[in-house]
Image (cartoon, helix red, strand yellow):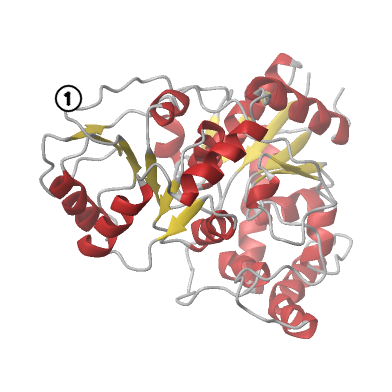
Amino acid sequence: MTRLLACQELGLGLGHLNMLAPVAGALSVLGHDSWLAVRDLAAAKALPCQPFARTLQAPIWLGSRLTLPALTLGQVYADGGFADDEALVALVGGWLALFELIGPGAIYTEHAPAALLAAHVAGLPAARIGTPFTCPPASRPMPALMPDATLSVAERAAADAVADRVIRAVCRHYGAPVLGGLWELLDRAPAFLASLPALESPDGRRDTAFYGPLSGIGAAAVAEWPDTPGPRIFVYIPFDRPMAAPLAQALATRGWPVIWMCSSAPTFPLPGTIAHEREPLDPALVLADSVLAVTRGGHGLALDALTAGCPQLLLPDRQEAQCHAWRLAAQGLGHIAPAWDAATLGDLLDAMVQSDAPERAAARAMAATLAGHDPQAATQRLARDMAQALRLD
């Protein structure tokens, strides 16, 4: 048996743990136990399943300064701690201390670049799992994020330059073999995508297989729809987000039955036609009964909706979600709201629940291609492939 460390340091919410938890469970079946070092301990505690032997606080970067959308993944990593030599030395030192305490034989990460660099310094095997955003290709230069940005190779290389320089400085500080930069750091950790080509950039990927949706986190709560006529709408948006109140207003005006999943209490009154569910719901059940899903564009629910053939009204407010939303909208699987006022959202709701809405036909066609997908088998296959890549006993 090999002790492994699952690592997550960038990003918020349960979505990142949706990747790590099922893989940890599948690895345990193979005889390998996983510890978890995570950004948000409260989110980890909220997992319906608990496949990790121990859960610890991850070393994390708290100095984000990016106020405008990043143009490349190189800028995302720079803002995650890879722009300051001393700061990254400290982050890597924190990971090295965890490695010494835990004694892992290897690590696997979901959006944890400093952990990858620490694994390089420590000589530990490493693998990456995640989405096209959190688990990018080891390309030089790193990919552009904005679909409408026309960046030259030289411009993308310049965006990587800061993180590349800091990586080299940290390697020299710890006396480790000096990496060329981000691309070489990522290249030493093979990628395993728990995603679909529909959420990848038009250029595609040749460095990894797409394993598709995994078996999830064991969410099993079942909700009752409000007893009112109209198309059923599933909403997964935190109440404290700026789009939540106008969305609730638009839905209340229409009087349709709504299930709104959010772990916190609402910050505004909800009508009786909106049922608030705090517990993580079984996505297959609720989406199978939904005419439309309204989300921020998160990767996990996007996969669930595609599997169920449910179109998506997308209200992204984070760059990672924005990237997923762009991919979905480009293929007609969802629609990005151009504004978040109640009138605009209401008009979009009215259009997207129609039986002839183009997004509904596209979503049903996508679901047909996924009809034979087995999430449990996909999770087991990913775990076996990753164990082989890490040369686990």
113, 49: nearer the viewer: 49
Is residue 241 left or right of 109 when viewed as pictured?
left
User: What percent of the width, then of the height, locates residue 284?
Assistant: 47, 26
Work out whether 33 lies above or below 301: above
Q: Residue at x 68, y 54 (%)?
A: 200
Q: Residue at x 29, y 64 (%)?
A: 340
User: What percent of the width, then of the height, locates residue 192?
Assistant: 75, 41
User: What percent of the width, then of the height, locates residue 220?
Assistant: 42, 19
Instruction: Evaluate whether residue 6 shows in this view.
Output: yes
Quarter of the image with the N terminus in it: top right
Work out whether 88 lies above or below 227: below
Q: Which quadrant would residue 91 be assigned to in this image? A: bottom right
Is residue 75 left or right of 392 when viewed as pictured?
left
Quarter of the image with the C terminus in it: top right
Work out whether 56 lies above or below 372: below
230, 61: nearer the viewer: 230
Identify which amino acid the numbered label 1 is placed on.
Asp
Q: Which quadrant would residue 367 be assigned to in this image? A: top right
Work out whether 157 lies above or below 310: below
Asked which secondary structure carries label 1, the reply is loop
Residue hosting label 1: 227
